[in-house]
Each structure stands twice: as structure tokens, then as C-alpha cells.
């Protein structure tokens, strides 16, 4: 192509570019033939470039390079419309001119619009990457590069593909092109951003959504106005308008002399077209193949043992067909297209392959989940590893029968294998946690039973060293439980930290159990105080029931019993599981003062009992607050006062009944007045024996009726109880005495009979 210098200078003068000084800009567009470049420029800038009439077919419309001023932009903005690339009209010369024109646009324009179809993003030739690579390379070689804006306009955008993904792909392609081109020594450290500002936008299909296309074109026009914040054009041009035509003519002359742009590509183009046709033909035949259709149906419905060999045979047949159709074409192009065919066929097979792999994964996962629950706890970790290795090998065996030889480790297999490993680990952790929880639960229950029995008895009896004994019992039982649990979990090969956490849980369960028992004992303090009082008041030091005779000191016994109850209350008021807390002596003294200050008229410890909490005692160690202790003690006094009053009444009744010895004068009078009767009894053996047996019967009847115990209840209740029991008790005692007498007579008769025989034996 030739550049008409005079006409270009005349046009620049007429368009006002020459008179604009540096206040003008240049916008150019490149892209495939019939891709709507002229249409885009006309809608954005208001130019009148010739547009293709689609009703007459798709053919070349713009030939060469055309210039126009943008009517809809203020100032002087030059718009350059280039002939489309990849056109069939130019034949072998097409690649030469398209490279020359594209390099010309890059060298001249401030903004180079790259018009690209949405479905061509990611392609090698469709996206024009070879052309961009060439013009970038030659631009460095022929000219001093300057910063320009590359505006990628993605046409016929798809609602299914996000614009961000398309932009990312284009950026990666541009970075790759930039990294692979040869740059001068002083520019090797420069990046793409140092010379080009990349911009991206998208437009809908012009024929289907013309109104939307026009509206977005208007929005795009605002980006070329200098008063816009995001203006793509520089503030001023690099050369004055008077030198515009001369500069373009000089640049075109340099480009025309560059022989590196004149590269024949007819053979490659023919191979590309024929390979594309053969590739599409093979894909169509593959989809129509009944063997593939049957295999796909079976693979989606059940697990197949021969999916891999059958799919390999189908792929091999498709590749043989492709090789036969492109046998005499360019080898490099054929190899690339063959690889593309493989990728596309594998993509068609991918759903069936994934279905097979998923079925295998689900089956092996189910088997693992079932077997891992039954692993022996003694060798859990080792058994689990063996099971993992066995099932992993089985999965690989299934994969060998499912995948094709052409790709021994496809991405799909690695994804499914990774998810299967995650399934294994998840099921293993669940089974492991379940087994450990079971062992921990059983250990906690056993520890609970071991602590509950002895500690309940201790808290019931409340000895003075109850807290020391409780702590010792907790320590011993906890140590035994921890040792047994540690032995049981050896097969899990726990890490030290995890093992400590579990044993801490077990120890905590024992402590919680004992704390619960202690709190329950504190909440039921009243019956424990009553039991201690009854034990000390109603029984002697030897455990024998007391008889409330006239000489028994009931007030002293009552005081001692109340003191014992107060000591029990002091033991239950403050917990000593973690050792005696501070302020314990004050609690004991305050509760002991309840006995000394029985009348409740105040005392030295009244302030301590009136406080909201025990002074010096931590809240965590407090079981009963002072107010709660006072309430328990009031109830205790109320319920034990009856027992004391009954004892006093019994003692009074015994005194009135003459429970003591008669006075001396009465004894002397009885002796003088009953002297004759006494002599009669002493000198009358039969009467003496009768009186003896009568006294013996009376004593036995007295013991059988438990007269002393009944008298403790009071005179009237004792009389009623004795009257109800006296007849059956008398009969029982009489029968027992008769039986004892008969047995004694029989024992006396036996030696008398055996004596002569013994004498004869001695003779």
C-alpha cells in the first residue's frame, strides 16, 4: 500500500488538525475482518465509515487505512479505521499488509482499540496474539516506544462468562507476549505497564441488541473527552498538528522498508483451516458414534469395570480418523490441532469419567466408614493405617480400569482422590473421636461410682477429718482411673498434648462428681446435724442407748451434742477440697458461738453471722453463706428441742416413780416391821425358791419389755406401750424359762445314769 502524502496534508489542514497545535489525539482500531470495527467507530465517534451490509453476505468492506475527524468529540480527534485482519480477499499478501497497518496504528495512535470477539478470548490466532507479538517486536526495533493506551473491546459478550475472567485471560496473554519478545538492552527491565495502559470494556451483540449497543457506545464516547476523569487520550499530542501529515508519511515509509513484516503464511493458513474442518468432523462423528452413546449411558448409570479400555478405543479411532484427513498438511499445525482434538474429546468424556470415579469413591468411602467403626481399640491407629493403605490401593486399581492410557493422571482423578483422602480422614477422625469419647465416658462413669460410694458415707458420718479423707479418696480413685484410661488409649498413639487434654477431662469429671456430692451434702445439712445430735445426745460414748435416770446431766449432754452439730455445720459451710481456706477458723468460731449463745441475745461473733459472706473466705469455697447457716441452725434447734424435752420429762417421771433408793429410815422401818416375814421366808425353802423364780421371771420380763427405752418417751407413752406388750411378752418369757428349766433337769439326769458304767470300767 502507498500513502498519499499530499491528500493527507490537505485533509489535516481541512480537519483542523494542523491548526490544533498539540491539542489533538489519534484513535485507531484493529481487529478481524467483518467484526464491526467501522460500526463501532461510527457509533462512538459519530464518523461515517462504510459499514458492511450483512444482507449481502460477509465480505471485506474497509480496504486500506481511512482517517476521519470525530464529529461528536470536542476539539480535533483523529479516528483511524483499518482494514480487518484474517481476510480472504488479499490472499498471501494479507499477513504482510495487516501487520504493516497494525504496526502503523500502534506507532501513530494514542489509543489503539483492539476489537475482539468474546468467543475468541483465549485463542491463539482468533485473539490476534501472533499479530500483537509481531507489531510489539517491530515497534521496539523501528521506533522509540512511547506510552499508549490499549483498549480491548470485547464484542458480543456472554452472560455466562464474567467479564472479570475474560479480562484476566487477556492480561495473562499480554504479559506472556511481553515476556517473550526481544527488547533492547536498556529496556529489558521495563514492564508492560511502563509502555501500555491496558483498558477493557465489553459490548452486546449489535444485531440483537442494537439499542443497548448504541447506549453503551455513548458511554464509551465519554472516556475520550478531556473533561472526563477517566479520559483515555493524553492531555496533548507528541508532535504539533502542522507536522502530523509529515510524521505519518515518515512512519509509513519506515514500516514499508521492514522486510520482517513480509512473512508468507499461506501453508500455515491452509493447514489451520483444513485441520479445523477435520477436527470438527471428528467431533461430530464421535458424538454420533453409537458405541460412545452406549458407553456414556452405561457409565452414568452404573460402575463399569472396562470404562477405560472402551473409552481409549473410541479416542484412538477418532485420532486415526483425524490423522488420515490431515496426512499431507503442515506437521506443526496438525500436531497442535490433534492435541486440541484430544482435549475436546476428553472434555466430552469428562462427565462420564467423573460419574465413574464418584461411584468408586462412594463405594470405597462407605466400606471404610463401616470398617473403621469396628477397629480394635488396642491397635486402633495401626489398624486404621493398614485399612487406609488397602482401600487406597483398591481405588488406584479401579482408576486403572477407568482412565485411559493417554493420561495416566488426569486432573479429575487427582481431584477425586483428594476428596477421597478427605473422606478417609473425616471418617477416621469421627470414628477415633467416637471411640475416645466412649472410653472417656466409661472411665468417667467408673470413676463416678468409685468416688460416690465412699464419699457419700463420709459426708453422711462427717468425721472431723472428712475433707482430708475426701481429698485422699478423690486422688487415689482419680489416679487409678487415669492409669487405666492411659493404658486403654495406647493403641490410638495420642500426642502428649491431646492425651493430657483427655486425662484432664477425666480428672475434671472426678472433681465435678465430688463437688456435686459436697454441694448436695451442704444443701441437706439439717438432717445431718440432727443425726449427729441424736447420736451424741441419745447414746453414750460406747454407743449404748442412754437411760434418763435422776442423776443424768441432761444440760451438759445437750450442750455437747449441740457442739457436735455445730462442728458438722462448720464442716459443711466451707469447702476444703483445695486445702483449708483463709478465714476457716473464723467460720468455726462463729458457728460454735451458736451453742454458747443459745438464747440468741447477741455475742462476740454476731457480726460474722450477720454478714452477707464469710470474712476472708473465697466465694468459690463457700458452700453455705452465714444467713443459710443461721436458717439451718434455727430449724435444727426447733426440731431437736422436742427430743431434749422428752428426755427431761422421762427423767422427771423416773424421779417421781422412785427410781432412786428409799431413804434410810424407810429401810430400817421395813426391816423391823418385816422381820418375821423375812425369817419365815428364809426358813421356808419352798417359799424361797418360789420368790427366786418370781424375781427371775420379773427381771426377764423387764428386759423383754425394754422398760428403760420406753420410759425415755415419757411416762404416759411408756405405760401405753408396756400395756400393749406385757401379755405376749409374759407368755414368751414363761415359755423360755420352762424350756431352760427342762433342759437343765435333762442335763442333771444324764450324768447320774452314766456314773455306774464309768465305775465298772475303772474296776
Image: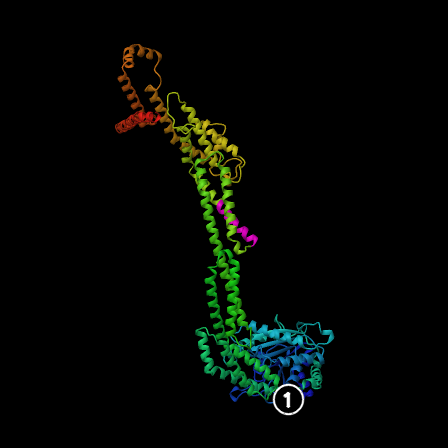
The question of residue 436 being in magenta is answered with no
Where residue 721 appears, x then y in whole percent? 29, 28
Q: Residues within 10 Å of mark 1 (few under 14, many from 20)?
A: some
Residue 53 appears in the picture as rendered = yes
**In this image, 381 relative to 456: left or right?**
right
Residue 308 sits above or below residue 702 on the image:
below
Where residue 380 appears, x then y in whole percent? 51, 58
Pointer 1: what residue? Answer: 93
Q: Quadrant of residue 97?
A: bottom right
Q: Residue lying at the far top in this picture: please name it.
A: 672
Q: Quadrant of the N terminus?
A: bottom right
Q: How is the image coloured?
A: rainbow
Residue 586 sits above or below residue 551 on the image:
below
Residue 16 appears in the picture as rendered = no
Q: Which residues are magenta?
A: 495-510
Name the residue at 42% across, 26% down: 557
Where residue 331 appears, x then y in whole percent? 61, 85
The question of residue 502 being in magenta is answered with yes
Residue 79 sits above or below residue 417 on the image:
below
How many labels sit on residues? 1
Q: Quadrant of the C terminus?
A: top left
Where residue 239 appears, x then y in whole percent? 71, 78
723 or 281: nearer the viewer: 723
Residue 450 sits above or below residue 609 on the image:
below
**In this image, 721 relative to 195: left or right?**
left
Q: Residue lying at the far front in this picture: please name it.
A: 763
Amino acid at each position: 500500500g502507498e500513502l498519499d502524502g499530499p491528500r493527507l496534508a490537505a485533509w489535516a489542514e481541512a480537519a483542523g488538525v494542523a491548526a490544533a497545535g498539540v491539542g489533538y489525539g489519534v484513535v485507531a482500531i484493529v481487529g478481524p475482518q467483518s467484526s464491526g470495527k467501522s460500526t463501532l467507530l461510527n457509533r462512538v465517534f459519530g464518523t461515517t465509515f462504510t459499514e458492511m451490509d450483512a444482507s449481502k453476505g460477509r465480505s471485506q468492506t474497509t480496504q486500506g487505512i481511512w482517517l476521519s475527524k470525530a464529529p461528536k468529540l470536542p476539539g480535533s480527534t483523529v479516528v483511524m479505521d483499518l482494514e480487518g485482519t484474517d481476510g480472504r480477499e488479499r490472499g498471501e499478501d494479507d499477513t504482510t499488509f495487516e501487520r504493516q497497518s497494525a504496526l502503523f496504528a500502534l506507532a501513530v495512535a494514542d489509543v489503539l482499540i483492539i476489537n475482539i470477539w468474546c468467543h475468541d478470548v483465549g485463542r491463539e490466532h482468533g485473539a490476534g496474539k501472533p499479530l500483537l507479538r509481531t507489531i510489539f517486536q517491530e515497534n521496539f526495533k523501528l521506533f522509540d516506544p512511547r506510552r499508549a493506551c490499549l483498549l480491548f473491546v470485547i464484542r458480543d459478550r456472554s452472560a455466562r462468562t464474567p467479564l472479570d475472567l475474560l479480562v484476566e485471560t487477556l492480561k495473562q496473554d499480554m504479559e506472556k507476549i511481553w515476556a517473550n519478545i526481544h527488547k533492547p538492552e536498556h529496556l529489558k527491565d521495563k514492564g508492560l505497564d511502563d509502555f501500555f495502559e491496558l483498558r477493557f470494556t465489553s459490548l452486546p451483540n449489535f444485531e440483537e441488541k442494537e439499542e443497548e449497543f448504541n447506549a453503551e457506545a455513548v458511554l464509551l464516547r465519554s472516556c475520550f473527552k478531556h473533561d472526563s476523569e477517566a479520559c483515555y487520550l493524553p492531555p496533548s499530542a507528541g508532535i504539533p498538528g502542522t507536522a502530523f501529515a509529515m510524521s505519518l508519511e515518515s512512519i509509513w515509509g519506515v514500516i514499508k522498508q521492514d522486510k520482517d513484516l513480509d512473512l508468507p503464511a499461506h501453508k500455515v493458513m491452509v493447514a489451520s483451516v483444513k485441520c479445523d474442518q477435520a477436527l470438527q468432523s471428528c467431533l461430530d462423528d464421535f458424538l454420533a458414534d453409537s458405541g460412545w452413546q452406549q458407553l456414556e449411558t452405561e457409565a452414568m448409570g452404573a460402575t463399569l469395570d472396562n470404562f477405560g479400555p472402551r473409552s481409549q478405543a473410541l479416542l484412538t479411532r477418532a485420532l486415526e480418523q483425524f490423522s488420515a484427513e490431515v496426512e499431507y498438511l503442515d506437521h506443526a499445525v496438525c500436531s497442535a490441532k490433534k492435541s486440541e482434538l484430544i482435549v475436546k474429546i476428553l472434555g466430552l468424556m469428562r462427565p462420564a469419567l467423573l460419574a465413574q470415579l464418584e461411584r468408586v469413591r462412594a463405594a470405597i468411602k462407605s466400606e471404610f466408614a463401616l470398617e473403621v467403626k469396628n477397629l480394635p481399640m488396642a491397635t486402633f491407629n495401626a489398624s486404621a493405617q493398614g485399612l487406609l493403605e488397602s482401600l487406597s490401593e483398591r481405588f488406584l486399581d479401579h482408576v486403572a480400569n477407568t482412565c485411559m492410557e493417554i493420561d495416566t493422571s488426569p486432573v479429575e482423578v487427582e481431584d477425586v482422590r483428594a476428596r477421597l483422602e478427605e473422606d478417609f480422614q473425616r471418617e477416621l477422625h469421627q470414628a477415633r473421636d467416637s471411640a475416645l469419647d466412649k472410653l472417656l465416658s466409661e472411665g468417667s462413669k467408673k470413676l463416678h461410682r468409685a468416688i460416690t460410694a465412699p464419699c457419700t458415707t463420709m459426708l453422711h458420718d462427717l468425721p472431723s477429718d472428712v475433707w482430708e479423707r475426701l481429698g485422699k479418696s478423690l486422688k487415689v480413685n482419680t489416679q487409678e482411673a487415669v492409669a487405666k484410661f492411659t493404658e486403654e488409649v495406647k493403641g490410638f498413639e495420642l500426642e502428649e498434648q491431646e492425651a493430657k487434654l483427655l486425662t484432664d477431662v477425666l480428672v475434671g469429671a472426678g472433681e465435678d462428681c465430688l463437688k456435686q456430692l459436697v454441694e448436695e451434702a451442704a444443701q441437706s445439712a439439717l438432717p445431718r446435724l440432727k443425726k449427729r445430735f441424736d447420736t451424741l445426745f441419745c447414746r453414750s460414748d460406747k454407743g449404748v442407748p442412754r437411760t434418763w435416770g435422776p442423776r443424768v446431766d441432761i444440760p451438759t449432754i445437750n450442750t455437747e451434742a449441740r457442739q457436735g452439730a455445730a462442728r458438722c455445720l462448720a464442716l459443711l459451710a466451707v469447702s476444703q477440697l483445695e486445702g483449708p481456706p483463709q478465714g476457716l477458723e473464723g467460720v468455726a468460731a462463729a458457728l460454735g458461738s451458736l451453742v454458747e449463745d443459745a438464747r440468741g441475745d447477741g455475742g462476740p461473733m454476731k457480726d460474722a453471722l450477720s454478714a452477707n459472706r464469710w470474712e476472708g473466705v473465697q466465694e468459690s469455697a463457700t458452700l453455705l453463706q452465714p444467713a443459710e447457716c443461721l436458717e439451718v441452725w434455727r430449724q435444727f434447734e426447733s426440731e431437736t428441742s422436742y427430743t431434749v424435752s422428752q428426755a427431761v420429762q422421762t427423767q422427771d417421771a423416773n424421779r417421781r416413780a422412785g427410781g432412786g433408793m428409799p431413804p434410810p429410815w424407810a429401810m430400817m422401818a421395813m426391816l423391823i416391821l418385816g422381820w418375821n416375814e423375812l425369817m419365815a421366808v428364809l426358813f421356808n425353802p419352798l417359799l424361797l425358791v418360789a420368790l427366786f423364780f418370781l424375781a427371775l421371771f420379773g427381771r426377764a420380763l423387764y428386759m423383754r419389755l425394754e422398760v428403760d427405752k420406753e420410759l425415755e418417751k415419757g411416762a404416759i407413752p411408756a405405760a401405753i406401750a408396756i400395756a400393749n406388750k406385757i401379755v405376749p411378752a409374759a407368755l414368751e418369757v414363761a415359755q423360755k424359762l420352762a424350756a431352760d428349766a427342762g433342759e437343765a433337769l435333762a442335763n442333771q439326769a444324764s450324768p447320774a445314769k452314766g456314773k455306774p458304767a464309768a465305775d465298772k470300767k475303772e474296776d
